[in-house]
């Protein structure tokens, strides 16, 4: 009846008391084992209410203790008695706790029984009633201490000597646990008890070591108890946070009660095991015991002193294992714990208590004993500890013997912890209570750690692609996670103490580098954290070569990095620093670095918003475009960079300069250059700057590079100093194409080609002139490089001719047309003089260009006067094209002549054209004024006479030289009445002064290219015809005599 709940409720209280008293009496008086067992069983199964049991508690407890003592010697009686203890502890927990000194010692004594069954049932009972007796009441600790002194300690030592080490350790764990706070009071007893595990920890049997570690948790329970820790009420936790943040009274209070010695004692065997070579199962048990300690420490686990004694040694030892297969789970467990500790910083301290404490739990199958660990936000005082742990983790990536898989795991783990760490640092940076000195401490600690990683990555022993990639990811993480207002602030300066830039000097063997005005950071400069990170990033990437494993990943990371810093921080400073470092590294392989930075800048242009533009507008609309121009100039400067070489090596060098790999790289660079220039021109940034001035500055920079190479080619110094002329030519073609296409768009948008007022605008005109100068220099350079690699030169020149054709089509005003002819004539003359161009596309584009030049002269508005001055400007080109070997060009030129100069009556024909005009006129291909034909028909046969009789005179017009023979002949064939009236004129010879002028002016008749009369600049040409008659009257001397001479000759 008493074990059936529905029946028990019907029993009156008095009857229930009578039953319980009777059961107790029977148990204590019977000599029959079965009766005693049945009585104890009834107590263990009864369902009486606690109020009924209280009235008979002493009698019932006395009976149960009698059964525990087991006077009959029956194991079943002991078992039933322990079942009764567990029942009463569940019903009357407080009463049982108060009387535990009575009933608990008998159970503990059986832990040292030689009967395994008795030990097992005793331990199961203690585990079941553990909440009732742990922490132990003082009376229980005292009673058990007496038993230990009298007998139990001696029995333990005997069992240990008998080899029952595991059984002894199980009992030892309960004994020390039940000592509780009195363990410190009974120091001699405790020291004697500690001699037991001292022997077993050093045992070579893993099972004994595991048993020792499990028993050691009893010492944790004894030494770490609520009396030593902060109360777990909400208010106390808030106070505890403050205590952890301060290092004054709290630390003194803890040390005053011997807390530090207890922690050191507990940690000694754990550190010894985790630092030695043991079985994996032993490591597992050690970590479980350590985690149990963390749990028992409650919020005191966050105290800096506890971190130093408890967290640091175990984390350090496990992380030094590395991500080895055997200890991989240990590695992951400690990573999870460390990550949880760091992320606790990100929780708001103003939230409720439940959200202030991070309760860590893990699902790891090896860590089934883990209990929640209460993490609180860490402070700046823990920076060194956290950096130390991250340094140990990442150090495995630089070990030469580590497997690729383990290296990758180490890098991933370090990056994961580092990102969590940065989130905590960011919390401090955003807090208004953080002081300037604390921010500087964080920055210096952080940057010092990153610098070490990057130096390891670039050292001889650490050149692995994985470590390279990870070091750059660390830099990217800092830029992405931390407050931009801190990293980019001028208030926070750090020393640029990189050894990689200590000995770098600006390249000074290229004269236009200094002209560019590029500034660069120097060793030990005080710079912002952002500049520090940018320089460090480039210093990691620059030593890499195209053969480096993962080079593509490094370049992709560099691109992302620069896009990020350009968007988040001051783009002027960021880009200027990058360009300055680039110009300290001028090898061809460094174009890979340039490519990545250029792509990042392009991404920046494409991602600009109105807000970003407002930031750029404030103070940097000149510096930023100049930095962009410097970046765009870099590939040209690299190709212009000359280096001395031995003559015997010149052949191999030239072969390397035209290798397929180098050509492919040049193509890639050219595409990136074109894309960046297009993005810069098309970006919204141009709303706040003038594209024309940027193009003008860029062309000026590029002209310097091309001029230097042309000068070396002209003076023959390329045999002593080698430059990448092919590369420069290829890149220049791309640049010319892009610049001229942009000018075409500008002309179309501003109507410069059609509007005279716009055409006269000095700024616009200057940009066009610089662009044409750059195009002219390219044509000269490509002409000089024809023999080196004709296929490439003809290909890129054809592209330039094509864009020039489009440009000429946009020209409609006299100044712009004549500027084009003046600028392009000399290099164009070289190309038109070439008779062996076999490439069809180049010939076709050259034909189109010449055709468009002739067409634009005829369509000019207002119309151009095709007079003697313009003819002298065009004379060198007409000399080569009127009778050009290619019929298409000659036919175009002849048609142009017939429609322009062929209709003019009064022309001064340059001497260089006389022979060509004579030939074509006699073949009736060109039209000349009718009055001139008889004379020109005889021109070839009387060349000596004409040389003597042709007159060169100085005039007051802008023309510096006039050939008088044509004028005299024109006048000679006037109507007969004029001839008759003039027949009696006497022949007048040249004066001595006129002869001297003639000789002086004929001496200036050769141009720079050696092709006849020099090409006149338009500034020296006067198209006015106002004083032509007066000049004619002065120049005509004796036409009758000339006519008579011609008749006699005929």
Image (tube, grey):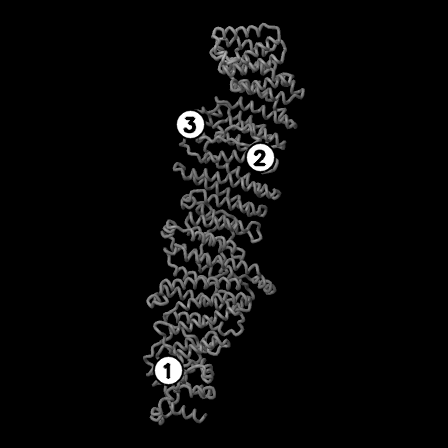
Along the line of sight, which residue is nearer the eye, 46 or 177?
46
Residues at badges 1 and 2 in contact (C-beta under 8 Å)?
no
State the residue position of label 2: 329
State the residue position of label 3: 239
Q: CA distance from mark 3 to mark 2?
A: 36 Å
State the residue position of label 1: 906
| Residue 709 visible in the shown view | yes
Q: Earlier in the sequence, mark 3 or mark 2?
A: 3
- Residue 671 vertical placement versus 611 (above, below): below
**Extreme-right residue of the structure:** 162
Question: In x, y percent, where is residue 320?
Answer: 58, 37
| Residue 1004 visible in the shown view | no
Where is the C terminus found, in terms of image quarters?
A: bottom left
Q: Earlier in the sequence, mark 3 or mark 1?
A: 3
Residue pictured at 48% horizontal, 79% vertical: 883
Please count the marks in the image: 3
Question: In x, y percent, where is residue 935?
Answer: 42, 87
Question: In x, y percent, where is residue 300?
Answer: 48, 28
Q: Residues within 10 Å of mark 2 (few under 14, many from 20)?
A: some
- Residue 617 vertical placement versus 1038 (above, below): above
């Amino acid at each position: 009846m008493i074990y059936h709940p529905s029946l028990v409720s019907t029993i009156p209280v008095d009857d229930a008391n009578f039953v319980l008293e009777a059961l107790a009496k029977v148990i204590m008086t019977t000599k029959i084992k079965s009766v005693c067992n049945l009585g104890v069983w009834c107590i263990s199964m009864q369902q009486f209410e606690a109020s009924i049991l209280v009235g008979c508690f002493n009698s019932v407890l006395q009976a149960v203790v009698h059964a525990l003592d087991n006077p009959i010697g029956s194991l079943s009686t002991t078992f039933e008695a322990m079942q009764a203890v567990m029942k009463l502890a569940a019903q009357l927990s407080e009463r049982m706790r108060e009387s535990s000194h009575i009933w608990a010692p008998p159970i503990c004594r059986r832990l040292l029984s030689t009967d395994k069954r008795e030990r097992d049932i005793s331990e199961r009972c203690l585990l079941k009633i553990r909440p009732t007796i742990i922490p132990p009441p003082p009376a229980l600790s005292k009673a058990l201490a007496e038993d230990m002194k009298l007998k139990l300690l001696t029995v333990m030592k005997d069992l240990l000597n008998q080899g029952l080490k595991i059984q002894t350790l199980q009992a030892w764990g309960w004994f020390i646990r039940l000592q509780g706070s009195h363990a410190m009071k009974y120091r001699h007893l405790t020291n004697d008890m500690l001699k037991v595990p001292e022997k077993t920890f050093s045992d070579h049997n893993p099972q004994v070591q595991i048993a020792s570690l499990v028993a050691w948790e009893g010492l944790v329970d004894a030494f770490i108890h609520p009396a030593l820790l902060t109360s777990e009420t909400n208010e106390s936790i808030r106070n505890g946070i403050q205590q952890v943040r301060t290092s004054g009274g709290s630390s003194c209070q803890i040390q005053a009660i011997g807390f530090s010695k207890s922690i050191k004692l507990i940690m000694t065997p754990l550190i010894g095991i985790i630092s030695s070579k043991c079985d994996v199962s032993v490591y597992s048990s050690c970590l479980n015991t350590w985690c149990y300690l963390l749990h028992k420490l409650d919020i005191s686990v966050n105290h800096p002193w506890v971190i130093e004694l408890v967290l640091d040694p175990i984390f350090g030892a496990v992380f030094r294992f590395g991500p080895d297969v055997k200890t991989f789970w240990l590695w992951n467990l400690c990573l999870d714990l460390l990550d949880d500790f760091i992320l606790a910083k990100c929780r708001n301290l103003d939230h409720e208590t439940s959200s202030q404490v991070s309760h860590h739990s893990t699902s790891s199958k090896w860590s089934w004993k883990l209990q929640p660990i209460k993490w609180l936000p860490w402070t700046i005082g823990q920076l060194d500890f956290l950096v130390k742990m991250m340094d140990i983790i990442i150090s495995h990536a630089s070990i030469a013997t580590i497997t690729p898989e383990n290296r990758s795991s180490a890098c991933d783990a370090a990056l994961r912890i580092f990102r969590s760490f940065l989130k905590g640092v960011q919390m401090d940076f955003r807090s208004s209570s953080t002081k300037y000195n604390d921010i500087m401490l964080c920055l210096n600690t952080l940057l010092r750690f990153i610098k070490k990683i990057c130096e390891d990555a670039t050292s001889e022993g650490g050149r692995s692609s994985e470590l390279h990639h990870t070091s750059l990811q660390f830099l990217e993480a800092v830029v992405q996670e931390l407050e931009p207002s801190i990293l980019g602030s001028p208030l926070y300066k750090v020393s640029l103490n990189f050894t990689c830039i200590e000995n770098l000097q600006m390249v000074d063997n290229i004269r236009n580098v200094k002209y560019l005005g590029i500034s660069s950071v120097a060793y030990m400069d005080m710079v912002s954290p952002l500049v520090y990170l940018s320089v460090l990033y480039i210093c990691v990437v620059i030593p890499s070569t195209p053969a480096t494993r993962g080079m593509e990943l490094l370049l992709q990371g560099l691109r992302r990095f620069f896009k990020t810093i350009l968007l988040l921080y001051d783009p002027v400073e960021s880009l200027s620093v990058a360009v300055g470092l680039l110009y300290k590294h001028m090898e061809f392989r460094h174009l890979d670095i340039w490519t990545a930075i250029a792509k990042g800048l392009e991404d920046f242009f494409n991602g600009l918003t109105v807000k970003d533009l407002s930031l750029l507008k404030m103070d940097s609309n000149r510096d930023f475009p100049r930095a962009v121009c410097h970046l765009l100039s870099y590939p040209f400067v690299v190709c212009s960079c000359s280096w001395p070489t031995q003559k015997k090596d010149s052949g191999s060098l030239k072969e390397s300069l035209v290798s397929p790999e180098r050509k492919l790289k040049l193509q890639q660079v050219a595409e990136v250059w074109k894309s960046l220039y297009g993005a810069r021109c098309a970006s919204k940034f141009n709303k706040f700057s003038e594209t024309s001035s940027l193009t003008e500055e860029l062309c000026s920079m590029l002209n310097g590079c091309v001029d230097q190479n042309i000068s070396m080619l002209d003076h023959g110094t390329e045999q002593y100093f080698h430059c990448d002329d092919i590369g420069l030519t290829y890149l220049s073609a791309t640049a010319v194409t892009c610049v001229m296409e942009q000018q075409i768009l500008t002309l179309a948008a501003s109507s410069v080609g059609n509007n005279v007022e716009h055409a006269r605008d000095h700024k616009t005109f200057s940009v066009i002139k610089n662009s044409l100068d750059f195009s002219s220099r390219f044509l000269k350079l490509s002409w000089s490089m024809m023999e080196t690699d004709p296929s490439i030169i003809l290909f890129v020149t054809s592209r330039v001719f094509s864009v020039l054709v489009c440009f000429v089509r946009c020209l409609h005003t006299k100044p712009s047309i004549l500027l084009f002819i003046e600028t392009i004539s000399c290099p164009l003359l070289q190309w038109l003089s070439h008779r062996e161009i076999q490439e069809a596309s180049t010939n076709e584009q050259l034909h189109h260009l010449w055709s468009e030049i002739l067409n634009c002269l005829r369509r000019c508005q207002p119309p151009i006067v095709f007079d003697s001055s313009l003819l002298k400007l065009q004379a060198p080109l007409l000399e080569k094209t009127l009778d050009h070997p290619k019929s298409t060009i000659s036919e175009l030129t002849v048609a142009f002549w017939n429609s322009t100069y062929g209709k003019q009556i009064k022309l001064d024909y340059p001497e260089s054209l006389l022979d060509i005009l004579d030939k074509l006129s006699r073949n009736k291909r060109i039209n000349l004024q009718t009055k001139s034909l008889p004379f020109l028909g005889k021109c070839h046969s009387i060349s000596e006479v004409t040389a003597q009789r042709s007159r060169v005179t100085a005039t007051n017009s802008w023309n510096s030289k006039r050939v008088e023979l044509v004028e005299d002949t024109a006048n000679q064939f006037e109507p007969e009445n004029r001839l008759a009236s003039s027949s009696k004129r006497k022949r007048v010879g040249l004066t001595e002064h006129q002869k001297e002028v003639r000789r002086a002016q004929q001496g200036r008749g050769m141009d720079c290219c050696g092709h006849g009369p020099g090409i006149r600049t338009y500034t020296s040409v006067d198209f006015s015809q106002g004083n032509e008659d007066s000049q004619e009257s002065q120049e005509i001397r004796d036409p009758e005599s000339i006519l008579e001479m011609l008749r006699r000759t005929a």
